[in-house]
Amino acid sequence: MERTLIIIKPDAVQRGLTGDIIKRFEQRGLKIIGMKLLQVSRELAEAHYDAHHERPFFAGLVEYIISAPVVVMALEGSDAIAAARASIGATKPSEAAAGTIRGDYGLEIGRNLVHGSDSVENGEIEIANFFSEAELCGGWQRDVDGWVFE
Ligand code: DAT
Ligand code: MG
């Protein structure tokens, strides 16, 4: 089982898309093991996007992610990293396939609605950055698991 960190970004929360976005991951079969609404601090935003520190868009990216509350989710499932990123769509929403979150709701790269971890290792790191162990329900048995996972 893999784990991925999903961030429903400020634009999606402000636009009232939170419920629809959660629903897409849920109906895909990914299991929610942590979820909360929070205002991201500048320190946490800079740590989360540290890989992009040298990029020209870094400052704007940090301002965007701290501009309003976000909903963060830790999701678990087989191939959770790839499955979640496929549901999210291409980084640039104008190029994202219809049917993906970005392809259905976005146009611009700086308003691309959702984050999903890009590797198993980063998923674990990012979840630990956003959630304490006590906030995660890691071992919970979902009654439909046998109908989603082989
Ligand atoms: P993704 O969010 O699809 O994993 P990423 O990790 O490459 O994409 O970049 C993180 C975020 O940074 C992305 O969601 C939007 C922003 N970003 C990436 N490339 C950008 C660019 N060329 N111009 C402006 N913002 C960019
Ligand atoms: Mg990324």
Image (tube, rainbow, N blue to C red):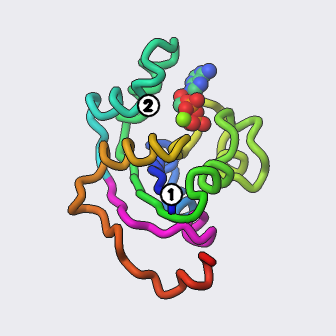
Task: Name the residue nearer the viewer: 125 or 150.
Answer: 150
- Residue type of the residue flagged with mark 2: Tyr
- Rendered location of residue 105, percent (x, y): 66, 48
- The residue that disc 2 covers is 64
Q: Is residue 100 left or right of residue 20?
A: right
Task: Name the residue nearer the viewer: 31 or 42.
Answer: 31
Q: Is residue 75 visible?
A: yes
In the image, residue 29 above or below residue 57? below
- Rendered location of residue 148, percent (x, y): 61, 78
Element type at marker 1? strand
- The residue that disc 1 covers is 2
Q: Residues within 10 Å of mark 1 (few under 14, many from 20)?
A: some
Spatial separation of the CA atoms under disc 2 and disc 1: 28 Å
Q: Residue at x 38, y 43 (%)?
A: 126
Task: Name the residue nearer the viewer: 128 or 34.
Answer: 128
Element type at marker 2? helix
For discs 2 and 1, the disc positioned in front in the rendered view? 1
- Rendered location of residue 22, percent (x, y): 52, 63
In the image, residue 90 above or below residue 84? above
Magenta includes 29?
A: yes
Q: Is residue 111 visible?
A: no
Q: Quadrant of residue 150?
A: bottom right
Q: Quadrant of ligand 2?
A: top right
Q: Quadrant of residue 80?
A: bottom right
**How many discs mark residues in the rendered view?**
2
Residue extent of the magenta highlight = 23-37
Q: Residue at x 33, y 58 (%)?
A: 36
Task: Name the residue nearer the viewer: 133 or 56.
Answer: 133
Magenta includes 53?
A: no
Q: Residue at x 48, y 52 (%)?
A: 4
Q: Is residue 33 left or right of residue 100?
A: left
Mark nearer the N terminus (2 vs 1): 1
